Each structure stands twice: as C-alpha cells, then as structure tokens.
Image: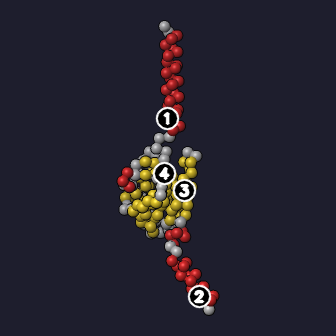
Amino acid sequence: MKNYLFAIATVMILSITPLSFADQRNYDLIVDGNTFDLSYDFDGELLAFGIDTESKSLLVGTTNVNESTFELSFSSEVLSAENDEFVVLVDGAETNYSVTHTDNNTKLSFVIPIATEEIEIVGTNVIPEFPLGVLAIMGIVSAATLVFSRTKLMQFR
C-alpha cells in the first residue's frame, strides 16, 4: 500500500512539472571571444544562431520544424530594443510576439509554422554595438597620421 501511494505521488509531481522546463535547450553564442548563453525551445532542430551587426539582429537557422511556439531567452547584452519593440521575422514575414523579463534576461515567445527555416529578431542594439578595437585602431591611425604630417612639414621648411 505504501509503494502504491508513493507511485501515485511521484506521477502527480511529474505531471505538474511543465514540459517546457524539461525541453529547454541551450546554445553558446561566441562573439569576439565572449560567450553568451541562449536558452531556447521549439519543436524542431536548431542549425545555428548568429549576429548581424549591420541590421542589429539575431539570426536563427532551423530545420525539421513542426508548428510550435518558439521560446528564446537571452541576455540584454546580446540584443535589446527600446520599449521592447523588437521586429520578429519568421521566414521574412513579421509575426506577433510576447516579451517577458527576468533579472538581466529577455524572453521572447512567438508561434512558428511548419517548415520554418529562418528567424530574424531585430532590435535597436546588438553586440558588439561598436567594438573598442575599432576605436583603438582609429586612434592609432589618427595619431600616426598627425605625427607623420608634422615631420614631413618640418623637412620642407
């Protein structure tokens, strides 16, 4: 009798656990030597995540997708939008989405149809917004140009 009650209690606890929690998958997005953890869930296979700095967007490649809800959780360092006004494109068509925030993470949820291949989430800021390396190189080139131009002028006086 005790084992029977234990089995029933175990089944009840497992049935209460949300399935999305069990199916959550992670992806390590590496950009300029920094690693960002992206958590996602949908009924299909992930090909890859990528960043497009020019369009300030996060790109998602998928395959073998069944109609499902795509849930993505990421750090606001990866992608952010003023007033949470992202643009979510599923195979080029804009779709509705919902946004929630926890700590420093943003969670987007939206429906994707069967056979979805590409998802693009456009924000207003994406990593790296303006890499410090480029700024340093521009400073060095400017300083070298200034020094070179002054020494050339001194020779012709």
Q: Which residue in the structure is indicated by mark 1?
A: 135
Write down the quadrant of residue 100 in the picture.
bottom left
Mark 1 or 2, nearer chain start: 2
Rendered location of residue 39, percent (x, y): 52, 61
Q: Which residue is mark 4?
A: 78
Q: Residue furthest right?
A: 3
- Secondary structure state at the residue bearing disc 1: helix
Marks 2/4: CA distance? 48 Å
Residue 14, above or below 58? below
Name the colouring of the figure: secondary structure
Cα distance in 3D space between marks 1 and 3: 27 Å
Ranked by sequence position, the earlier of labels 2 and 4 is: 2
Kind of residue at badge 3: Asp
Amino acid type at mark 1: Leu
Q: Position of residue 2 (x, y in %)?
A: 62, 89
Q: What number is the disc on residue 37? A: 3
Kindly tell me whether residue 64 is visible in this rendering: no
